[in-house]
Image (spheres, rainbow, N blue to C red):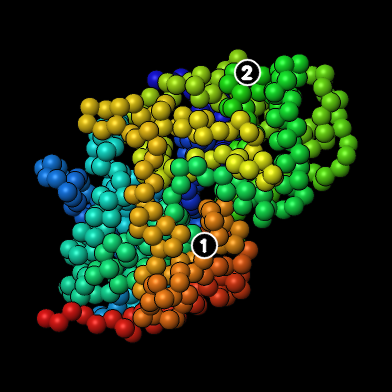
Amino acid sequence: MSSFSFRRLGGLGAVALAFAAHVDALAPSNPQYVKLGAKTGSALNKRQGVTFPQYNFTQPLDHFSDTGFTFQQRYWLSDRHYKPGGPVIVFEAGEGPGDERMPILDTGIIDILANATNGLGIVLEHRYYGASVPVQNFTTDSLRWLNNEQAAADSANFIANVTFPNIAADLTAPGTPWIYYGGSYGGARAAHMRVLYPDIVFGAISSSGVTHATVVDWRYFDIIRQYAPTECIAQVQKTVYEFDALIAKNKTHDAIKAVFGLSGVSYDPDVASLLSAPLGGWQNTNWDPAVNSNGFARFCAALGTPDNATVHTVQGITVSNATFNYAKYINATYSSSCPIEEQDECFGTITNKEFYEQTDLSQTWRLWNFQVCTQWGFLMTPPPDPKIPRIISNLLTKDYGELTCTLSYPPGEHFTVPPEPNVEDVNKLGGYNIAADRLAIIDGQDDPWRGDTPHSPDPAAHPRKDTTIRPFKLIPTAVHHWDENGLADPSAEPAFIQTIHHQEIAFVKAWLKDFKPPSQ
């Protein structure tokens, strides 16, 4: 067991939250990001909304083989807008505790759609997350039922069989239209449910859905490079190239680590990883002040504006003003929180393997990380083409990213993590070109999880009965599933958010006009 102490986090919290397995989004994948996220915990929504009643639904541990074990899957219910004949609007809680999603049920997209359609709103917690935990530890063997197939079967079983307290009517599918909404990983889940279970999922909205999985994802940071503030990115790029050049030379290797206050970090890729950590804050920017993080803005402000000035440091090397400012930020935010002699423990990966060996139920970082290692990938690297500018170090290789799997999940008696994530488990359902009737795919222009810019499928190849919305809708200037949030006073939302909410209401209403319950 690692002796890492939470008292050492100091200034880590504000920025490292970008990599926590939290309520708002996926997190970039590498072993140090996993560690930083685990130590900073969950990013709670700052809006205090009303609470909703919690209920449990009994699920089998394994839908495809009878183990004799079941668990209780949590869900939350809002009937404030429900009238008989209305649909069920379900929110996929994804890779985090469902009770952190209550603002979505109160003023967010589920309430918005339920209000417009006389619908019943639900937040459904994902197996293994929150309190919907079916096992007694998070060892490799115990995690083997955490996969896409089991999660999809959970949702299908719920939709087809749930009975709601205080509602006498049978609202199960296919007799009632169910609209499935999710964002990010949950967005992929929503799209997959429409493809896998079209008879019971009447419609789905995939917001920033990562429907295409990839072992290596160099585009995440490249999209940040393209859409984040130009002057900030120029400073980052200048620093990264200078850092790589200096750390590669024996005579300047130790000095550049010292400039960043990281002399105690033995493994150079761990130093490079820490330099890239503030960039993850980009995806946590949001129009909604209750969920917005100012971390990326503070980082950019600290870097200053581009110039040609240099600084001769006390470590005996001359660096650009960009690198000097970057180093001051890293020192203040990370390095100073941990004594030099303990930095391998604070920030190290291969030098602190004990952290990754913890398997008790408090180690919730192991959950999404396991899904990364088995089916999803997204190991973050620089661009493969050196002609493409980069904002992260060349030391962040695929081999470094794979440490997140090899350090964390030794082979079990019943299950072994594959050598590489089996991303075909995801992509066989359509990937970038996923398409189905009554499936809306919505994304933000500035979203680093977009990967390749998706294109609408060929209408001839994917004929659609519904023509109320294109398969792909791009929200200008938005980042990660920004349509998910809403305000009690919708008129206070930005105009482009109001527009997308009105469009979502319109096409969901159009879908529902086509609903015909199965003949009795």
Identify the residue at horizontal 28%, vertical 55% (top origin). Answer: 152
Pointer 2 with pointer 1, Cβ within 8 A: no
Residue on which disc 1 sits: 454
Image check: 289 left or right of 355? Answer: right
Badge 1 amino acid? Pro
- Tell me where residue 489 appears, x and y as whole percent: 53, 72
- Seen from the viewer's position, the closer of residues 119 and 154 is 154
Whether residue 432 appears in this view of the structure is yes
In the depicted view, which residue is nearer to us: 359 or 318? 318
Label of residue 430 in the image: none
Residue 246 percent coordinates (x, y) = 74, 25
Who comes first in sequence, dot 2 or dot 1? 2
The kind of secondary structure element at disc 2 is: loop
* CA distance separating discs 2 and 1: 43 Å
Rendered image: mark on residue 264: 2
Q: Is residue 250 found left or right of 155 in the rendered image?
A: right
Decide which of 117, 250 is in the foreground and name it.
Answer: 250
Asked if residue 337 is positioned above or below residue 439 in the image, the reply reads: above
The image quarter in which residue 462 lies: bottom left
Direction bottom: furthest residue: 513
Question: For the residue carrying disc 2, how many other residues have a C-alpha within 10 Å: few (<14), some (14-19), or many (20+)?
Answer: many
Q: What is the x, y in percent for residue 405?
A: 41, 32
